[in-house]
Amino acid sequence: MRIKRANFVVVAAMFLGAAALIVIPGARAQNPDEMLPAASAAKAKGLLQQAIEGLGGAAYLNMHNSDCSGRYAQFQHSGDVGGYIEIREYREMPDKLRVEYGPKANIIDTYAGDKGWTLDRGGVSDVPAADMAEYQEQLKMQMGNLLRNRMNDESLFFRYGGSDVVDLKEADWVEIGDHEGRTLRIAIGRNDHLPIRSVLTERDPKTGEKSERSTYYTTYHPVEGIQTPFRESRYLNGRQTYQAFLDKCSYNVDLPANFFTRESLEQRFSQVRKKK
């Protein structure tokens, strides 16, 4: 069965419209609507710098690839979990992704910039154009890409979104937007400065309808100096589409030069056929 590859797209880098946010009682918090744009942008960037430091600072910024493995929940149309499958996910910054499914890795999806391929029992084929377009679209506002590469991008605007309690943790919201109608909101924990949730809002250029992609980041563990969320849940317009439980992660690993290419998948397919 073909697994919906769009569930593995990064947005940012990783992560509810239906969940209510709890307002912090007590002292009056700073009202973001009363702040001048320059002050709001400065506060937002300051919080994002704290998040970068919380995630590992230089180790986080200089991470060029990752190798993570664990279990992925497959969701049925009803929203119920239809089972779990082993996955191994490789990333190379800023725009390469390879996901291997099952213990034998006989199904693989690979994305490399504006190209993508799928390996299954029938061989190697191009990723459908719609899935490729969705992957590229979400990369533009993926959280990790923004924190590593776009903090000084003058085409983006930054805004402080106010304080809150998000998933039972005191947090501050930061908003990042572009001139094409995309907005990424990130809730950053006040105590550990780690991202708790991200919410990407975008508008379909054809229909004009808005969509909201939300991601929860939980169960952080330090791995080689980088704080890594070992549990990630994603929602599209309030409906859960993705849940992953990682077992282990490694960073800056040695990968073959052709690892994110069609050639690599064709070599893998040849190996699988020989074993059969």
Image (spheres, helix red, strand yellow):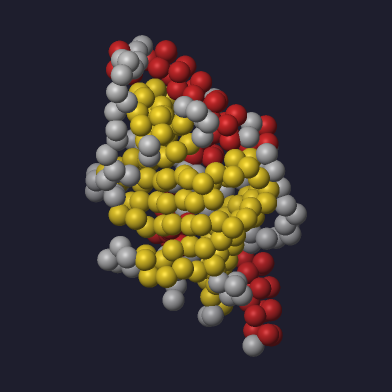
Residue 129, image x, y percentages = 43, 60
Residue in the picture at 59% in, 72% down: 103
- Residue 69: quadrant of the picture: bottom right
As rendered, which of 267 and 225 lies closer to the eye?
A: 225
- For residue 79, above or below residue 178: below
Taking the image as shown, residue 171 lies to the left or right of residue 89, namely left
Percent from the top left, x then y, of residue 184? 40, 36
Residue at 54%, 26% (x, y): give it.
Answer: 50
Q: Residue at image x 41%, y 66%?
A: 74
The spot of residue 167 in percent (x, y) is 38, 39
In the rendered image, the quadrant that contains the N terminus is bottom left
- Viewer-proximal residue, 55 or 207? 55
Name the residue located 38 percent from the left edge and 70 percent from the top edge. 82
Up-down relation of residue 208 to residue 34 (above or below): below
Quadrant of the rendered structure where residue 128 is? Answer: bottom left
Residue 127 lies, with reference to residue 124, above or below; the image says above
Q: Is residue 242 left or right of residue 257?
A: left
